[in-house]
Image (cartoon, rainbow, N blue to C red):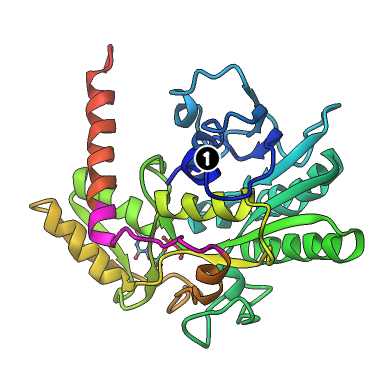
Amino acid sequence: MALDGLTSRLEVSMAGSVLVSGGCGFIGSHLIDRLLLRADLEALVVVDNLWTGSRQNIAHIADPRLSLEIQDVESFRSDRRFDEIIHLASPASPAWFMREPARTIKANVGGALNLLPLLKPGGRFCFTSTSEVYGDPLISPQPESYRGSVDCTGPRSSYDESKRCTEALLFEAQRVEGLDIRVARLFNTYGPRTRTDDGRAISNFINQAVTTGILTVYGDGSQSRSWGYVDDIVDGLERLFWRDDLSYRGPLNIGNDNEVSVLQIARFVCSLVPGSSIEHHAPLPQDPTNRCPDLTLARRVLPGWEAKTGYQDGIERTLEWVRKEIAAVEAAPGA
Ligand code: UDP
């Protein structure tokens, strides 16, 4: 449900001026669609270097309140101050963050350090952390109190540790300065607006199914994740980021708690695209074996929120979007 529905029932603060880093990205662009529904939003500055994001994700928006700054978040400069800052800028696909670990760390930690001084006194700083802070978890499902099983020198560490370090920075600012922070730990998210070369499981499987017909499953596919459809995840973010009447501000798990193996997902995609098949490849190093959010706290803190979309429905919708995108590219002049 979009916030214009929520505002009638819940206490939300004035949006005023908002900065979103990573607003051209997959989740960021969906979130700014929701922000722009708010009549109390005065100005929205999106800072994005288009590393993993794309102008195309916001090309449908013609709203004079929106301005785009194509810059690295860690070095963005502005004389303006903002009522709310939402820091999403970061690659989220292992294929992308493993390729450029230093840049990943700069975007997360450097970005937060650089943006904090741009907040007005009394402003709010929101951050999308990750289930990766739990590493390869030894308990399931993972509650927010679980401290994780993370290798700080492992191949995924640039992402895991930069999200953890940014959480540390923000919770210290909350403790020491009383800063209003909101921290979501997002579990695997998929849906329209992921790049064709994103590299994550569902986007890879769908794109592979409609192009080569060969889906690459790493290892035997018994590793599991909890797959959240983007609309449900953004519904949760709206509630966490924009409500005033929250007694708890994070870290909060946001995801779908139906845990499904990678092989099951690949088989389902194959069932939707006749002629496609699965090919097993070498397992990825330190690939977490499982991941499932404990949503007890989220259900208490964000009453009414639920990740309702099952993976079958979500994957069908994503496949439909991918097919439309391909058709649009093929129909474009000069294609
Ligand atoms: N995966 C796979 N084939 C792919 C992409 C991913 O088998 O083409 C697996 C990957 O090894 C992992 C799971 O799918 O076990 C989820 O990977 P993803 O990159 O989507 O997210 P992660 O949870 O690892 O950050």
Q: Which residue is nearer to you in this view: 317 or 264?
A: 317
Would residue 224 be visible to someone looking at this image? yes
Q: Which residue is nearer to you in this view: 147 or 62?
A: 62
Is 287 in the magenta? Answer: no
Spot occupied by residue 232 in the image (x, y as percentages of width and height): 41, 54
Q: Main secondary structure of the magenta part?
A: loop
Q: Which residue is nearer to you in this view: 145 or 168?
A: 145
Number of disc labels: 1
Helix, strand or loop for disc 1? loop
Residue at 43% across, 23% down: 60
Spot occupied by residue 201 in the image (x, y as percentages of width and height): 36, 59
Residue at 68% across, 57% down: 182
What range of the chain is rendered magenta?
Answer: 302-315
Give the side of residue 143 with respect to residue 271, left or right: right
Is 305 in the magenta? Answer: yes
Q: Amino acid at mark 1?
A: Gly
Residue at 49% across, 73% down: 295
* Tag 1 residue: 25
Q: In the rendered image, which quarter contains the C terminus? A: top left
Give the side of residue 207 with respect to residue 58, left or right: left
The furthest residue to the bottom: 138
Q: Which residue is nearer to you in this view: 128 or 138?
A: 128
Spot occupied by residue 321 in the image (x, y as percentages of width and height): 28, 38
Spot occupied by residue 52 in the image (x, y as percentages of width and height): 53, 41
* Position of 27 relative to 59 (above/below): below
The furthest residue to the top: 333
